[in-house]
Amino acid sequence: MRIIAACLAILLPMITTASAATPAERHGFAFAKSHCARCHAIGLTGTSRLKKAPPFRTLHDRYPVETLAEAFAEGIYTGHSKMPAFELEPDQINDLLSYLKSLERAGPRGRSHPPGYPRSME
Ligand code: HEC
């Protein structure tokens, strides 16, 4: 009995860590929260503050989110009439894409969201 308890004590934290967000996903979320959330819904639920801005969790329905890397590097200007132009560093792009991909995995048909993820930005 004690051995089983000891095994659980070792295994449980490993399982929890495996399903938690990676550092890149967390950084991407923090970045989105401070730079994008005032217009876009960035979590798994909720509506965008600016109606025209697509919720981040819907981006992958339109195109593979990887294709945004170039636009982020050069600055998204097109179609962003209301949005300040911005250019991201490679690290920031990597983090942001990791976060966007985690939303994709966590979608309705994917696994449930990892702990610590925003349910809503409201
Ligand atoms: C001031 C408001 C505002 C902020 C801040 C903002 N956006 Fe947007 N964003 C918009 C609007 C409005 C649209 C829709 C533009 C359209 O469809 O014409 C949009 C669209 C997008 C799209 C979809 C582009 C496409 O053509 O499919 C992406 C990707 C995006 N934003 C990323 C970001 C990221 C990443 C950030 C933060 C770094 C951000 N936005 C911050 C207003 C904003």
Image (tube, rainbow, N blue to C red):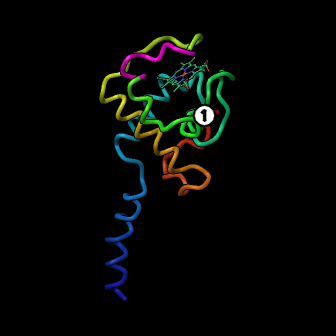
Q: What's the residue type where badge 1 is placed?
A: Met
The relative height of residue 46 versus residue 19 in the rendered view (above or below) is above
Q: Which of the four quarters of the rendered structure image does ligand 1 lie in? A: top right
Query: Relative to 87, is 48 on the left or the right?
Result: right
Q: Residue at x 64, y 41 (%)?
A: 45
Residue 63: x and y in percent read 52, 36
* Magenta span of residues: 71-79
Residue 4: x and y in percent read 36, 84
Residue 34: x and y in percent read 47, 24
Query: Relative to 97, is 53 on the left or the right?
Result: right
The relative height of residue 54 versus residue 103 in the rendered view (above or below) is above
Query: Relative to 51, is 94 on the left or the right?
Result: left
Q: Residue at x 66, y 36 (%)?
A: 46
The relative height of residue 41 versus residue 104 in the rendered view (above or below) is above
- Queried whether the magenta region covers residue 113, the answer comes back as no
Per the image, label 1 sits on a secondary structure element best described as loop
Q: Residue at x 55, y 26 (%)?
A: 37
Q: Residue at x 67, y 32 (%)?
A: 47
Q: Nearer the viewer, residue 100 or 49?
A: 100
Which quarter shows the C terminus? top right
- Residue with the mark numbered 1: 121
The relative height of residue 5 versus residue 55 in the rendered view (above or below) is below
Residue 11: x and y in percent read 34, 71
Find residue 26 and report its image quarter: top left
Local packing at callout 1 (Cα closer than 10 Å; few below 14, some 14-19, many 20+) is some
